[in-house]
Amino acid sequence: MRHSLLKLLSLVLFLFVAGNVGAETKWVKTDPAELAEGDVVVIYELYDGYAMAKDGGTSTPKAVKLTLSTDKTQLKTTPAANLQWTVKRDNGYYQFYDSETTYLYCNKNDNGLRVGDGTHKDFEIKIVDDRQWLFNVGQKRYVVLYQSGSVKDWRSYENTTGNTYKYTTI
């Protein structure tokens, strides 16, 4: 069933859906299993509050700070257009698009997460240590929020542990 709500897909897998409450649109948390073809989502890391921008191109997607309500069930502001991804469902997997030729994908090189026209664009949700992760099925990589000093961006790695990154994704 297609939701008329926009969703915020949050790391450590939480989704926030944007729906109308009176004349106001709110982005609220929802279950990733409820995503349908054509839904609009924000991929979000819940602990420090960073969303994934879709304009990274050949470099890693940028991390953009957003603020949640105190109970972490909705965004306090409407996210910018470059943070809103469209969902496509293909053979049970998720694909996240900006357009039919620009989408989130993984490769096996270095930090591995890109926005563009790569071939490995199928993702699923994996549970590891009671946390939900966005997982690329073709390259077998987890999407993570990476931090080096004060700089944060989105990357993909083959596991969810390590000293180079500290957050889960979706």
Image: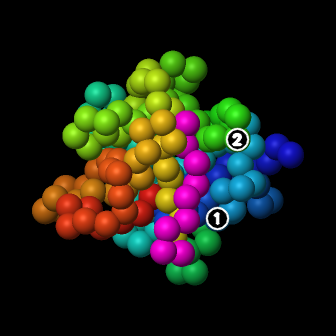
Q: What residue type is disc 1 on?
A: Lys
Q: Is residue 119 above or below residue 25?
A: above
Residue topped by disc 1: 29
Residue topped by disc 2: 92
Residue positioned 42% across, 24% down in the render: 118
Q: Is residue 120 above or below residue 93?
A: above
Q: Residue furthest left?
A: 149
Q: Nearer the viewer, residue 80 or 3?
A: 3
Q: Nearer the viewer, residue 32 or 7?
A: 32
In magenta segment, residue 131:
no
Left or right: where 21 falls relative to 110: right
Magenta portion: prevailing SS class: strand
Please provide percent x and percent y for residue 73.
61, 72
Tell us which disc is closer to us: 1 or 2: 2
Q: In which quarter of the image is residue 67?
A: bottom left
Residue positioned 44% across, 34% down in the render: 105
Q: Is residue 67 visible?
A: no
Number of residues whose C-alpha sits closer than 10 Å to that of mark 1, classed few (under 14), some (14–19) or many (20 or more)? many
The secondary structure type at the circle numbered 1 is strand
